Amino acid sequence: MTIKKKGSKAQKSNASGPTADSAAPNAPQTYDWIRVVAYSALAWLVIWGAWQRVENCDRWPSTYHIMRQYMSALRARDIYLALTPSSQQSDKEQIYYQKVSKEEVYEPPVNELFTALAYLVIGRESPYVSTYFSTLVWLAGGAALFLTVLQLTKSPITQMAAVGFYMNSPLGLIVSRTFQPEPLMIATFLLALWLVLRSGYPTTWRRVLWLGTACGMLLLAKPGFMFFPLCAGFTGLGLTALGIKRLLTDPRWYAFGILCALPSILWIQVVCPQQQGVSFLPALLWDMSMWGQWIQYLEDYYGWATLLFVVLGIVLFSGDRWRWTYLGLLAGYMVFVIATNYRSMSHTYYCAVLIPLVSICLCPLIDGLFQQASQNARTATGIILLTVWLTLIGFSAGPEIQSYYEPLTGGEYVAIGRAVGVGSNVVAITDDYARGLKYHSYLDAKHWPHGGDIKLQRAAGEEIESFTTRLENFRKSGATHFVVILTERVHGEQEILQHLTEKYTISAGVNGKYVIFDLNQPKSNQE
């Protein structure tokens, strides 16, 4: 006898296979067996994902977006030195704190604050400890994702697949190990989305006010990033509940969006208006090479086959209740890509926005594939294959999370600091926007723009100054030395290097490693 459950048509269409198909007398026992196996696999995937994040994490920094890693480490140092009494600071730390410019802040420095507090406990700077905080945050995000998926499906297999993908996605492993704010951004987004799905489309102004305010504060973890996916998902709920005509005339829909956006807008306008100015460049909307680069990012970190199956799963298997929510999440990501086209198409970590969205949007596909989960052998085989796939997908991140960035040894960085004087103002050609010199040599190091920076300035309509004018401006701002780290980048800087060689004396250097030009000692003065 088939048991009919009370509820709306939408609720019935979203029931998972094991719940809906319970005709056989032994269905409860079969379902319990499936639940045990699926949750056991989920436990393994969570443990495996956490282990991959912390294994050998003391090898810092990796080669993935080196500048971003150093920026976070420098912010943590600024906080650490501010909290450390001067009597407990070393001489170079005192000079650094007094003379070197503070690192700019683009989002609330939560990760940096906890890392700095860890420094106080262990008594020294160890940037890799941020990985432990990021891993805990990622696990918290996994818990929020699990609660979110519980709203969407009752299938333990689907819950295992969604959280398993989240824990082991290659890009998720990378950003968790590289001192970046993305783990907190994703975890807070998942918490906000869970609140939205749990609440449903609000029917009272009181609910709109608390829900919009809570979500807006959660989105502050990385201002503006997850706004479009969250609001698009919320819009999907509204379309299901009201239909498009009523939704467009509902003031509560607009109020939710405003409340979500307001904290991020205030942060961006007050703290970092200059940073956001180069996120969107209209000219790049028609640049096929940039779109091609973005497409390659998706292939590298997700695989187009995976993304295609996710979309097909939504089209073929999602029920009426959640279909527009799934589509809204993906549409929100596309709006985000267009709104931040320059950075989304040139910075791979912007693809991290997709991690929670793909994890959630896997649900219809897995539900559809395991609708008939009453045959033990087939179901067990399916769970095993799914678990193996989710276990292996993270291996593609291996080269990037196990790599180690070290253009100079610690001793060579120290030697540069001594040669020019700790706390000195220098300009530098490096692969890390001069942040490595600032961090290891305790210098107020400024980045010499490379070809990509010049291209961005041109696309933004800014005037491009000559390299001699740029150098003179650095000198006027107090730069005393020009440090060149001899990496592959120097091959594209022959013009300025020839000028420096002809005009300024070399004060120090190590063959094949670095050279330092003294900007206070022009060769013409010696002649």
Image (spheres, grey):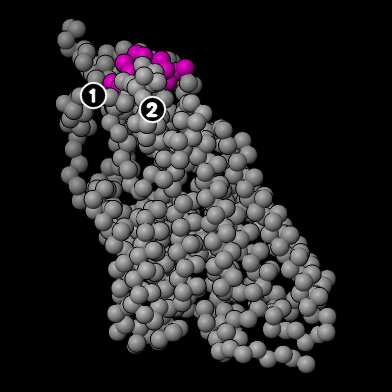
Image quarter of the C terminus? top left
Helix, strand or loop at label 1? It is loop
Residue 310 percent coordinates (x, y): 57, 69
Q: Amino acid at mark 2?
A: Thr
In the rendered structure, the answer to whether residue 349 lies left or right of residue 35 reads left
Cα–Cα span, label 1 and label 2 = 28 Å
* In this view, the mark in front (1 or 2): 2
Tell me: 169 left or right of 210.
right
Please report the residue visible at 83 percent of the width from the left and 71 percent of the height from the top: 377
Query: Which residue position is annotated with label 2?
Result: 84
Q: Is residue 337 magenta?
A: no
Q: Quadrant of residue 474?
A: top left
- Circle 1 sits on which residue? 479
User: Is residue 284 at least partly visible in the picture?
Assistant: no
Compared with residue 193, is residue 128 higher up or lower down, i.e. above or below?
Answer: above
Q: Position of residue 31 (x, y in %)?
A: 76, 74
Give coordinates of residue 219: x percent, y percent.
39, 59
419 falls in the magenta region: yes
Q: Secondary structure at mark 2?
A: loop
Q: Residue at x 42, y 82 (%)?
A: 239
**Stretch in magenta:** 411-427
Camera-side residue of 459 and 353: 353
